[in-house]
Image (tube, rainbow, N blue to C red):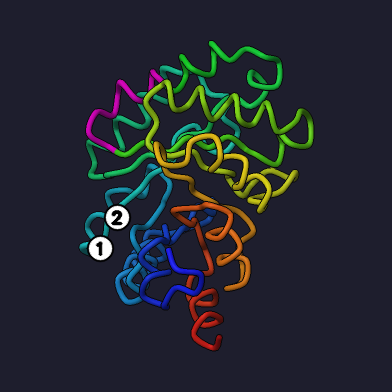
Amino acid sequence: MPVSPSRQQLAALVDHTLLKPEATPADVAALVGEAAELGAYAVCVSPSMVPVAVDSGEVLVAAVAGFPSGKHVSAIKAREAAAAVAAGAGEIDMVIDVGAALAGALDAVRSDIVAVRDATDGAVLKVIVESAVILAHADERMLSDVCRVAAHAGADFVKTSTGFHPAGGASVRAVEVMAATVGGRLGVKASGGIRTAADALAMLDAGATRLGLSGTRVVLDGLSRG
């Protein structure tokens, strides 16, 4: 990725996202239309909205699983993810049990990811690690360890954040740590709190290969103004 990507290049790295609980089918249809107009890579929606997104246009659909707490039983996460794939989702963004990670129960984190991986064969799997929480309550080594667990469990990406946790979303340092750990083997998705073109470029410079944005147009407009 060049230091200063074009508007089109940046858009092609974006999961245009709508995960608000109050989102309506009309909102999701509008999201898909905007994603197509902007040239986004995909849309990211709640599982119940996958059929709406699929029917609204020719845009790749990602769905979340275990969102936003990650405290769901693994079998439920797996069934939720499998149902989303059956409905047409091509990618799944699952949330780990962050508390298990902080307690050092990395085997449980691995098993949780494997359950979803096994249920979604053929779909791209992104593992949300809530990096801000891990960095606030543990350290960079723990963040690296969780990313390694995700890699060993069959993930295709590690992802910073849900964007719903009060600890915060993506940070440059978190992306740097995650990219140093899995870069070249897995993708790194930065998501949560990326609101400006400068934010987006900083995440890419740190090693992100995908961005989760809800305000995609604003970010792209900022880039084009240079």
Assign the magenta stretch its main secondary structure.
Answer: helix
Q: Callout 1, which amino acid?
A: Ser
- 24 left or right, relative to 20: left
Q: Is mark 1 on a helix, strand or loop?
A: loop
Task: Give whichever of 27, 3 is nearer the camera.
Answer: 3
Q: In which quarter of the image is residue 200?
A: bottom right
Of all residues, the one furthest to the right in this rendering is: 137
- Whether the magenta-drawn stretch holds residue 197 is answered as no
Coordinates of residue 140 in the picture (x, y in percent): 70, 33
Query: What residue does disc 2 label?
Result: 52
Q: Which residue is at a point 37% across and 36% down the rendered structure image?
A: 156
Q: What element carries label 2?
A: helix
Q: Please count the marks in the image.
A: 2
The Cα–Cα distance between marks 1 and 2, rounded to whole angstroms, is: 6 Å
| Quadrant in the rendering for residue 181 | top right
Q: Which residue is situated farthest in the bottom direction here?
A: 225
Quarter of the image where the N terminus is located: bottom left
Tags 1 and 2 touching, CB below 8 Å = yes
In the rendered structure, the answer to whether residue 80 lies left or right of residue 147 reads left
Please state the extent of the stretch shown in magenta in the rendering.
Answer: 114-123
- Residue at image coords 51%, 69%: 3
Instruction: Identify the residue at horizontal 74%, vertical 36% (top origin).
Output: 135
- The C terminus sits in image quarter: bottom right
- Find out whether residue 119 is within the magenta segment: yes
- Quarter of the figure with residue 20: bottom right
Which numbered disc covers residue 56? 1
Left-right relation of 162 to 9: right
